[in-house]
Image (tube, grey):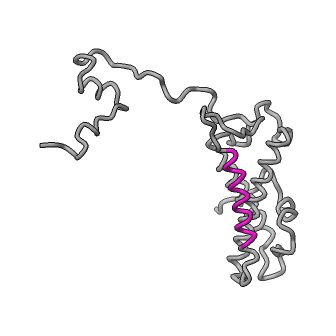
Amino acid sequence: MTAPVPQSQYITLDNVINYIGSDKVLIADNDSTAIPTALANQLVATGESLALLDISPYYQVYPSLQTVDGKSWTNLPTMTYTTLFNMMVIQSALQIIGNFIARNTDDKDGTLSYYQNFYSSEYAKKLNRITDLLPNGSYRYQLIGLKPLTNGINRKPKKYARSGRIGNNNSYANNQLTNPQQNYSNVFPFGMQD
């Protein structure tokens, strides 16, 4: 039994071809230098999933993009929808161009490599905007309308719990057992003293 071929959920091959243009990469089933249509569709699904993986530490994307109101992702606010759409298309374009270069190895003048570098930097700009933190710990540019991964639970407790009375409160052993975050490595700055 063979594994099923991945299918894209959000964008199509036409979206990507419109973005990169049909003059840069040849996608056809009757040419040995071209990328077959089935493979191109698989590369689109790969690019889409890579873009979703990049935002998965911040937003709920499994089993599909989770919106706050439970509606389709196409009903997201314009800025959020456009950002997600472009991230998926750019990542898919990178997959297709990279595969085309690998299949043909004839990028002598570097034109396709230029486009690959350009798309990589554009993608990095978009991803950096999403992951950029303000001094207060919140994200500078949020994808409004998507369900965040965390639901408001503070991950850094203000106080550490103590597990009963072990010695007096100022003892070395007491602090080591009840507060492992406290670090005593600087007591002897040059290593253990004899």
Q: Residue 18, relative to residue 180: is it above or below?
A: below
Residue at (85, 59) in percent of width and height: 15
Q: Quadrant of the C terminus?
A: top left
Q: Taking 162 as reference, is 153 left or right?
A: right
What is the x, y in percent for residue 170?
Answer: 26, 20
The one of 175 and 166 positioned closer to us in this rendering:
175
Q: Residue 40, relative to residue 45: is it above or below?
A: below
Q: Taking 73 as reference, is 58 left or right?
A: left
Residue at (50, 29) in percent of width and height: 156
What is the x, y in percent for residue 112?
Answer: 75, 74
Residue at (22, 46) in percent of width and height: 191
Q: In which quarter of the image is residue 3?
A: bottom right
Q: Give the range drawn in magenta.
A: 114-130
Across the whole image, how many numbered discs are drawn on residues? 0
Q: In which quarter of the image is residue 34?
A: bottom right
Residue at (37, 32) in percent of width and height: 181
Main secondary structure along the magenta-highlighted residues: helix
What is the x, y in percent for residue 139?
Answer: 66, 37
Q: Quadrant of the N terminus?
A: bottom right
Q: Taking 161 as reference, is 74 left or right?
A: right
119 drawn magenta: yes
Q: Quadrant of residue 78?
A: top right
